[in-house]
Amino acid sequence: FNWIDLWAVPCFIYRLSQGGSITRNHSQYSDIIQFLFIGVNPIMRLLKLLRRFSKCLLVFSAIVDAFEALPMLLYMLLLLVMTAAVAIYYLEPRDNIESWQKALWFVVITMTTVGYGDTVP
């Protein structure tokens, strides 16, 4: 047993006292209690099972190792976005892209392939 198992007991008692349903009270204190007892506890108990799976531990260690390269990757992404935004701003006519901010918006939306359709060259 550990602290997550001990935390499950008052959460279970709280759920029984509420009839197993989530009621909406208009006080901040009751919202925090419901969040801790009804929201966090089941998630923590599911996360506790992850330590039993060796493949999950392998994935977690790979993610931790990948965080070393993250600042450089983000820097390169920012450099690419800024370069593309400046190129779009200078190459497009002003009736298509009026400002540098709109060029930046166009580049980010295009690179993320969302494509809202509000700005087109």
Image (cartoon, helix red, strand yellow):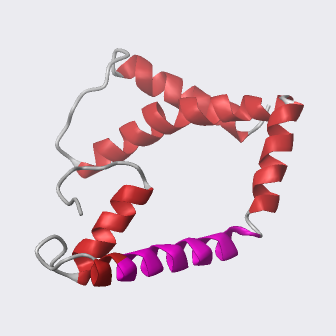
Q: What quarter of the picture does the N terminus occupy?
A: top right
User: Where 23 sits versus 101, above or below?
Assistant: above
For the residue pair 67 and 30, the one nearer the viewer reads as 67
Magenta range is 69-87
Query: In the depicted view, which residue is nearer to us: 2 or 105?
Result: 105
Residue 75 placement, left or right of 34:
right
* Residue nearest the observer in this picture, 85 or 90: 90
Q: Is residue 37 above or below residue 27?
A: above
Measuring 24% from the left and 63% from the top, which residue is drawn there?
121
Residue 105 locus on image (x, y percent): 29, 68
Q: Is residue 40 above or below residue 20?
A: below
Q: Position of residue 76 (x, y in %)?
A: 61, 75
- Which residue is situated farthest in the left direction here? 95
Residue 68, how many percent across, how many down?
77, 70
4 lies left or right of 68: left
Based on the displayed image, in which of its 4 quarters is residue 53 positioned? top right
Q: Position of residue 87 (x, y in %)?
A: 38, 80
Could you tell whether 18 is left or right of 92 in the image? right
Our reading of the magenta stretch's main secondary structure is helix
Residue at horizontal 22 percent and vertical 59 percent from the top:
120
74 falls in the magenta region: yes
Q: Residue at x 21, y 47 (%)?
A: 27
Task: Tell whether 32 sits left or right of 118.
Answer: right
Residue at the location (20% across, 60% down)?
A: 119
Name the foreground residue: 117 vs 38: 117
Q: How many marks?
A: 0
Query: Residue 39 lies in magenta, yes or no?
Result: no
